[in-house]
Image (tube, rainbow, N blue to C red):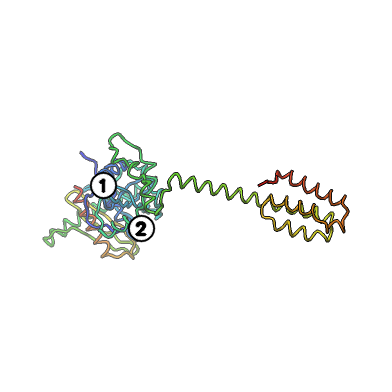
Amino acid sequence: MMIRMYENVIADLMSLDGIKAVILSDNEGNVIESESILFESREVESLAAFITDFFNKGVETISKTLDDEVFSVLIECKKEKLLISRVNENLILLINADSRTNIGLMRIETRKAIEKIQLME
Amino acid sequence: MMVVKDKPIAIGKRGNFTNIFCELSQSGFTGVAEVSYRLDEISRAKIVFIKGKIVDCKISKLISKSELTGDEAINELLKVDKCVVDLYTINESAIDNFEQNEVYLKSTAQAVPVTEQMSAEGNPLEICKLNREEILKKYKIKEPSEEEIEAIIKKAVEDELEVLELDELEQTKEELKTIARKYLGKLSKKIENAIDQSTFPEELFDCITDIKKSRSLLMFVSKEDLNKMIEEMDSVLKAKNIEKVNI
């Protein structure tokens, strides 16, 4: 099996102002690629596992309720923002940003990142 | 000077930077290569290629927010073992701009190892070597012929000799004038003028001959002093290897 490297995607997102962490994980919450200004690797792993679980359960529930496909969830906190997006059936992209970061820009860059990953597959 | 990337050519090209660089050089790639890698931290390099040659390079370190450019950036990239490269085209105006400037990073020529896979044509060492004729043409320098070079050297040497001779002549004149003042006092003015008017060392002999013949001087100066003065002047000229030329 070929080893995937997504440094280009992580670098694209990390170069944006206000982005604190970018995590690319599989459906089970295992970190595939990540970079963070604040967190240590163990914290990143915990965060990825927790968020992936939360995302999977939330998406499943909302999909059943609305009878629609959910591909992105935005969590806004007092200090931070979390944008969780499904890249494909196996990958989940989590972006942690400062609360002042522009949501529109985050969405556009996330979409570009997903397109890039799909091109690399 | 960085350029704006245009359309993607290849996304997620993986491997060793040196190998990818050699590949791009050999294929004569024109465009932007975005190299993402981790050395001490995640970094992103933007490299501008024109016809397989690197014309600009900048590394952005994404955590520390520091930047590296030029040779420093290239040297760091050469240490990168695993990287992901995205290739993009650039617009033609940017290509023209770079071609006019023709700036190539010198370290790519020095630092990139020559592998067996590289052909002589694609070798970065060959690519980055600036042609002598091109440089002469660029700066509009006309290469002088052998005769011209010899003439220039000859002229320079002659000028130097002339300067030396003039200095020596002035020194001799001063010495002769001092001797004249010593023996003649105020009467030496006429002789000093005659010495000053001499433009060649040989003419100084004529001055001394004139002094010998002068009768008016004998009215005010004793013949003994006059002979002593002439002897001293002769010895000065002999010390300077100045000889009378008989035509």
x and y percent of residue A111 in the render? 22, 58
Residue B82 image-quadrant placement: top left
Q: How many marks?
A: 2
The answer to whether residue B193 of the structure is visible from this angle is: yes
x and y percent of residue B67 in the render? 40, 54
The answer to whether the residues at label 1 and label 2 have Cβ atoms under 8 Å apart is no
Pointer 1 residue: B28
The answer to whether residue A38 of the structure is visible from this angle is: no
Q: Which amino acid does label 2 sit on?
A: Met
Instruction: Decide: is B187 above or below A33.
Output: below
Does B204 sit left or right of A119 as displayed? right
Mark 1 neighbour class, 10 Å CA radius: few under 14, some 14 to 19, many 20 or more:
some
Does B100 sit left or right of A71 as displayed? right
Which of the two labelled residues, at mark 1 and mark 2, occupies the earlier sequence position? 2
x and y percent of residue B152 in the render? 50, 48
x and y percent of residue B25 in the render? 28, 44
- Camera-side residue of A88 and B11: B11
Q: Which amino acid does label 1 sit on?
A: Gly
Mark 2 neighbour class, 10 Å CA radius: few under 14, some 14 to 19, many 20 or more:
few
Pointer 2 residue: B1
Chain of residue at mark 1: B
Q: Which residue shows up at 35% across the image and 63% down it?
A: A79
Quadrant of the image containing the N terminus of chain B: bottom left
Same chain letter for marks 1 and 2: yes
Instruction: Decide: is B26 above or below B47.
Output: above
Q: What element carries label 2?
A: loop
Q: What element carries label 1?
A: loop
- Camera-side residue of B181 and B139: B181
Chain of residue at mark 2: B
